[in-house]
Image: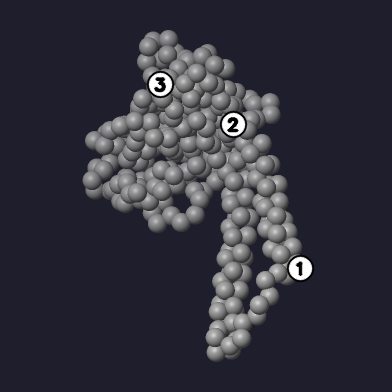
């Protein structure tokens, strides 16, 4: 699937956690969970490549070795105990090699030990609702930026009016729930994916190890405007995060949205003609 996006300004700022033109692998990692996912992906990829090469070589050998010209009288052997044990035990050992790091990764992703803060994420048709219970319990909604309002450093169909702001290096508990139907909170570069289910609260966590902008989308078909639920996570230094939460609390008391952090204001201060800077981008991972 292809999207048009105002890519040039975003890449110039060193934005991480977004699709790249002709991207083939996983998105660049922004935290420890995605590091673990990438390592596991590399392990499984190597195993698959080895198995594929082995099967192709074996198939080619059998076609050549047992062709009619070289083997006019086929063998009538129907059983070979050693071979049957081997092709049973070896696949089991391969699955064990895959299963052990797989289970470790699942439990690692499950929840944070002693998280520094909690953010509540609620999926709604068709936008995201965020709450910061540890910082005054202010809340806000997040919608995609309209095409005509795309600014410098923003990306069509991925940038939002009110991003989720987190401090760099903090272990953050994410509690998800749904208001209407099932949605999915999915940020590939941070290794986060968790359903938001009405009537249930699910837990996961995330951490960004460096400042940046990390994009995602709802990847659970949730209705006609499913595409209308991008996610933008901005990781900022702790001092900037504290200033932003103080600002957000004040604006929330006035019935206003939190407003972007200073780094986002600087990045988007100059408008950009989206039609002049748009480029096709592969976002297969976001839609997976």
Q: Nearer the viewer, mark 3 or mark 1?
A: 1
Rendered image coloring scheme: one colour
| Mark 1 lies on residue | 82
Q: Residue at x 24, y 35 (%)?
A: 148
Above or below, 6 relative to 204: below
Q: Residue at x 34, y 36 (%)?
A: 227
Residue 111 placement, left or right of 20: right
Earlier-in-chain disc, 1 versus 2: 1
Question: Residue 180: which disc?
Answer: 3
In front: 123, or 56? 56
Question: Residue 211: which disc?
Answer: none
Considering the numbered disc 1 on the image, is that residue within a helix, a strand or a loop?
helix
Earlier-in-chain disc, 2 versus 3: 3
Q: Residue at x 58, y 34 (%)?
A: 206
Q: Residue at x 43, y 37 (%)?
A: 219
Question: Residue 205: which disc?
Answer: 2
């Amino acid at each position: 699937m292809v999207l048009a996006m105002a890519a040039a300004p975003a890449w110039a700022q060193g934005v991480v956690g977004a699709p790249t033109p002709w991207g083939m692998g996983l998105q660049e990692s922004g935290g420890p969970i995605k590091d673990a996912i990438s390592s596991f992906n590399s392990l499984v990829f190597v195993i698959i490549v080895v198995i594929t090469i082995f099967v192709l070589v074996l198939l080619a050998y059998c076609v050549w070795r047992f062709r009619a010209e070289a083997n006019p009288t086929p063998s009538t052997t129907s059983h070979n105990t050693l071979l049957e044990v081997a092709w049973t035990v070896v696949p089991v050992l391969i699955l064990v090699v895959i299963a052990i790091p797989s289970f470790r990764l699942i439990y690692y992703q499950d929840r944070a030990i002693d998280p520094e803060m909690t953010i509540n994420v609620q999926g709604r048709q068709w936008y995201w609702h965020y709450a910061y219970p540890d910082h005054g319990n202010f809340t806000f909604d997040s919608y995609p930026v309209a095409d005509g309002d795309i600014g410098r450093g923003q990306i069509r169909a991925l940038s939002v009016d009110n991003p989720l702001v987190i401090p760099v290096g903090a272990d953050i508990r994410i509690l998800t729930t749904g208001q209407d139907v099932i949605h999915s909170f999915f940020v590939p570069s941070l290794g986060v994916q968790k359903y938001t289910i009405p009537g249930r609260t699910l837990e996961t966590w995330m951490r960004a190890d460096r400042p940046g902008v990390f994009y995602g989308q709802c990847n659970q078909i949730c209705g006609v405007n499913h595409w209308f639920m991008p996610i933008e996570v901005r990781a900022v230094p702790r001092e900037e995060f504290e200033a932003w939460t103080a600002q957000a609390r004040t604006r929330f008391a006035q019935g206003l949205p939190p407003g972007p952090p200073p780094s986002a204001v600087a990045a988007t201060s100059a408008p950009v003609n989206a039609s002049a800077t748009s480029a096709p981008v592969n976002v297969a991972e976001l839609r997976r």
